[in-house]
Image: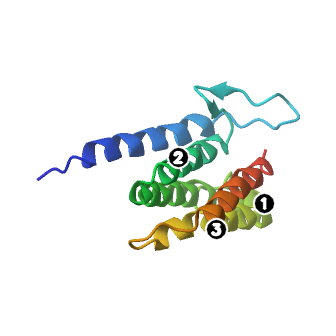
Amino acid sequence: MRHSWQKPMRTRLFLAFALLIGTRGSAASAQERKVAQVKGVDNSKMGPYRALAQHIYSDFQKGDVAAAAEMGRVLERLWDKAEDYGGDTALSKTNHKLFEEIDKAMDEFLTPLWEAKGKPPDAAKVKAAYNHYPETLKLAA
């Protein structure tokens, strides 16, 4: 039996994966050229992670903590697949210290969403962690 939420979630998962794949081959250093955007997503290696975080935070702001937590798992899995186990170009291989810093910032943002069980997490804490996460992603530019 299909649930009504499955189709939108599959669409979101597909879009998240497409964002990640679409930017993997276009990595250029910030010194070489200004980072362009495609439909509001930075056309950089870190752009898809930033875009997913924006959607997650938007869901949280709308009061849909369950959707935010679910998409947080998607963000975490995409990050791990590409930047931890993604081969020679994975950030964990090219700059392990920065990988750890970004991974920690992502966990600080997502953990309150994952641990919310029946009550919303502290909005100020989530906002502060959300604001910090994209800043750490900029370090990888």
Indicate the position of residue 57 as horizontal and vertical percent values: 55, 51
Q: Nearer the viewer, mark 2 or mark 1?
A: 2
Which residue appears at 58% of the width and 53% of the height? 82
Q: Is residue 3 above or below residue 40?
A: below
Q: Nearer the viewer, mark 2 or mark 3?
A: 2
Precedes in sequence: disc 2 or disc 3: 2
Amino acid type at mark 1: Asn
Q: Residues within 10 Å of mark 1 (few under 14, many from 20)?
A: few
Q: CA distance from mark 1 to mark 3?
A: 20 Å
Q: Is residue 16 above or below residue 34?
A: below
How many discs appear?
3
Q: Nearer the viewer, mark 1 or mark 3?
A: 3
Which residue appears at 50% of the width and 54% of the height? 60
Precedes in sequence: disc 1 or disc 3: 1
Indicate the position of residue 42 as horizontal and vertical percent values: 67, 34
Amino acid type at mark 3: Glu
Q: Which mark is residue 58?
A: 2
Q: Which residue is mark 1?
A: 95
Q: Quadrant of the C terminus?
A: top right
